Image: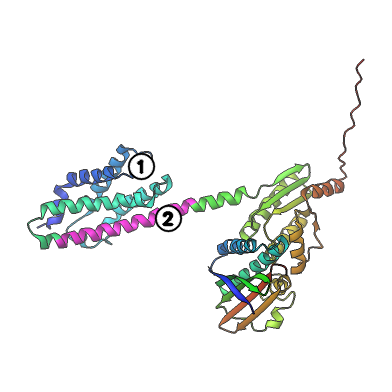
Amino acid sequence: MIISLSKDVMTITRDQDVVPFRNRVKEKAVKIKMGLVNQTKLITAASELVRNMLKYGNGGETYIEIVSRGRDTGIRLTFKDKGPGIADISLAMQDGFSTGKSLGLGLPGTRRLVNEFDIKSEIGKGTTVSIIKWVNG
Amino acid sequence: MHSKTFTILQKKKNQILELWLNNQLADEGLREDLISNQDLRASSEELVDVLVSSASDDNLENPESSDFDPVLEILAGVSMTRARQGFSPRETGLFVLGLKEALLTVLQEEMSDSPAELYTESLKISRLLDSFSIVTFETFIKGREDVILRQTDEIAEISTPVIRVWDGILALPIIGTLDSARTQVVMENLLQEIVETGSSIAILDISGVPAVDSLVAQHLIKTVSATRLMGAECIISGIRPEIAQTIVHLGIDLSSIITKATLASALRYAFSSLNLEVKKAIREKVSIR
């Protein structure tokens, strides 16, 4: 059972929103005393997903939550866009696959950086990605 | 037959100007440090002159009329300079709104006998001046945006210095996030400097980059490839432990690139590949008898 302790909403529409968003995530991570390595992993994952959202979904909404489950505290980030959606999620989760001209590491790499990873997508409606990084994860 | 407002404008020009100036001078927020009273008077006088000469019977009701272009030009000029000089929006807004006050006061004095007429004429003047103040705000903000844009350019330039650390060795400390535009500037500066100095080794130091995601990595790889095409070797230094772990988990392959933890070790590597040796000098003791 995951309980959400605080929730922030941020709308992402431009490239310039990436850095403030990352800083906000970092602030929260510092607040729950996350270690430097996990902090960096979370911020990098956030950066990947938010860039994906801008590039393929034309921006959208992000939620930054402090969550707890039993004794664990962590941060849950949710990225919601109203873009074209992903046709084949298992293909998109493969290393090196990209419909843009990038390295194709965004989604699979992010999954390796965080503890929980969840992706839902519907063609023509948009994509929602949600990740959790526990303080001691 | 001229409309009454128009006649009043013509006749009471000086009174309007004086009232307006008094309004401006009476305001506590008057920035005497930024603009002298003479300048204020001159710009106010110019504006009233142009306003009166471009107003006519039929365009008073039509603020969009092209007759007012000279007025708008002056207003735009005034607010643009004020934005650059550091006036606040309130101070700039009061400049135009003060004129409205003055005009309405004069109208009220002249038409006190017929309230209905006063009402319609005041409405016209209000509309006209409101559209002027909108223009003032727009240009004021545009002026501020120009300042911001200029500063952004300056920051982009300052933040990517190419340092010649030794003959044939360049160093480029990157601070902040590497986005596409930034990479472009970094790459241009670096490649240009390689040509100019004939350097064969470039060190990219990323100690100041807060996070390396796949986009940043892609930009780094591109910069390294471009440097190699120019016949120089590129070393990436300043990889912090947490960044190293993140890169591995992300699955970014940087194995084809020479990477070092610190700028010092990158420099040592550069020295050895240029067959340079750095030694501690042994001084002979001079004995004094």
Query: What's the residue type where badge 2 is placed?
Result: Lys
Magenta span: predominant SS is helix
In front of the other: label 2 or label 1?
1
Q: Quadrant of the C terminus of chain B?
A: top right
Classify mark 2: helix, strand or loop: helix
- The boundaries of the magenta stretch are B119-147
Q: Residue furthest front?
A: A71
Whichever of labels 2 and 1 marks the residue nearer the N terminus, that label is 1
Q: Residue furthest top?
A: B289
User: Which residue lies at the image location 78% right of the left edge and 63% below the top edge?
Assistant: B254
Labels 2 and 1 within one chain: yes
Q: Residues within 10 Å of mark 1 (few under 14, many from 20)?
A: some
- Is residue B15 one of those drawn in magenta? no
User: Which residue lies at the image location 28% right of the left edge and 41% below the top edge?
Assistant: B41
Identify the mark at residue B142; answer none if there is no mark: 2
Q: Residues within 10 Å of mark 2 (few under 14, many from 20)?
A: some
